[in-house]
């Protein structure tokens, strides 16, 4: 069983997303320390990309900030290795396919095998993932497929078989961004995915509160934009305190 599955089987899990290098790599390292102290065991690390089509303005702006500071993929990989060694957490890099294609699928899988338990590629549809998955499997890295609100039952069954981590159930059509509430249809869709899937399911996109964390009928919940909003690029200590306050308000 993969490490991320061992975490998910314990209890409902909150998986925070942090954009690496926003506002600096040192800040990201300190934010991870805060998250670990809050009890977080799995973290999604976003690798800055200039055209993040699945992300809303909050995450897009954080990526732009990091890119202006010349944060490269290799910088994030080195940081992730350090975090993995120091905190023994499950690290899930999230990046766009161009960054993988440019390096080559096998070289990419080999490079991230030093720290990654799983990988999320938001612009790579499952039906086009066959070029990447074998290389990930070779290095014991789990591929995480996406489910969307209009997914067919047969496709839920298929993608469930091709991950050793979880299905990433996108809660809404469109881009990331904190939302105050979800429609009844969202809950019905997630219940359907959870019922049909033979694997763990994590809900993502729009999560911002304890109520959503508790009500969403999934094994895990991913929080991104709401967490990134807690970061003041000009005040590291305030950012750390904001992150700590938000995470504790959700899981405690």
Image (cartoon, rainbow, N blue to C red):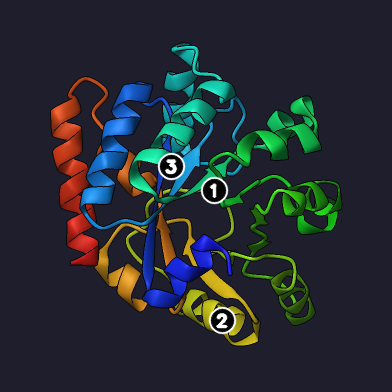
Residue located 34% across and 45% down the image? 87
Q: Nearer the viewer, residue 125 or 90?
A: 90
**Mark pair 3, 2: CA separation:** 30 Å
From this view, report whether residue 18 is shown above or below residue 200.
above
Decide if residue 4 is in sight here.
yes
The x and y percentages for residue 179 are: 37, 57
The x and y percentages for residue 146 are: 65, 60
Decide if residue 216 is in sight here.
no
- Which numbered mark, 1 or 2, is in the foreground of this view? 2
View extreme (bottom): residue: 195
Q: Nearer the viewer, residue 56 or 26?
A: 26
Q: Judging from the image, what secondary structure is the residue with disc 1 in? A: loop
Residue located 74% across and 66% down the image? 162
The x and y percentages for residue 190 are: 53, 77
Label 1: few (<14), some or many (≥20) within 10 Å? Answer: some
Q: Judging from the image, what secondary structure is the residue with disc 2 in? A: helix
**Mark pair 3, 1: CA separation:** 29 Å
Residue located 59% across and 87% down the image? 195
Q: Earlier in the sequence, mark 3 or mark 2?
A: 3
Q: Nearer the viewer, residue 177 or 114?
A: 114
Q: Quadrant of residue 211?
A: bottom left
Q: Earlier in the sequence, mark 1 or mark 2?
A: 1
Label 2: few (<14), some or many (≥20) within 10 Å? Answer: many
| Mark linked to residue 194 | 2
- Which numbered mark, 3 or 1, is in the foreground of this view? 3
Q: Check disc 3 and report the residue beneath it.
A: 84
| Mark linked to residue 175 | 1
């Amino acid at each position: 069983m993969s490490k991320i599955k061992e975490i998910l089987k314990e209890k409902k899990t909150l998986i925070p997303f942090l954009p690496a290098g926003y506002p600096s790599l040192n800040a990201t390292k300190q934010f991870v320390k805060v998250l670990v102290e809050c009890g977080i065991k799995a973290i999604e690390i976003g690798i800055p990309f200039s055209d993040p089509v699945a992300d809303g303005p909050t995450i897009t702006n954080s990526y732009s900030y990091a890119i202006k500071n010349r944060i490269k993929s290799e910088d994030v990989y080195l940081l992730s290795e350090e975090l993995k060694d120091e905190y023994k957490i499950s690290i899930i890099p999230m990046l766009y396919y161009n960054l993988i294609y440019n390096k080559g699928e096998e070289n990419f899988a080999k490079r991230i095998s030093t720290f990654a338990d799983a990988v999320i590629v938001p612009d790579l549809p499952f039906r086009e993932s066959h070029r990447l998955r074998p290389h990930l499997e070779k290095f014991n890295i789990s591929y995480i497929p996406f489910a969307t609100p209009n997914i067919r039952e047969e496709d839920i069954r298929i993608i469930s078989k091709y991950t050793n981590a979880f299905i990433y159930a996108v809660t809404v059509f469109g881009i990331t961004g904190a939302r105050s509430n979800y429609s009844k249809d969202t809950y019905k869709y997630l219940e359907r995915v959870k019922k049909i899937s033979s694997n763990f399911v994590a809900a993502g996109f729009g999560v911002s509160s304890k109520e959503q964390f508790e009500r969403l009928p999934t094994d895990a919940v991913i929080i991104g934009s709401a967490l990134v909003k807690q970061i003041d690029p000009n005040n590291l200590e305030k950012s750390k305190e904001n992150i700590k306050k938000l995470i504790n308000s959700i899981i405690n």
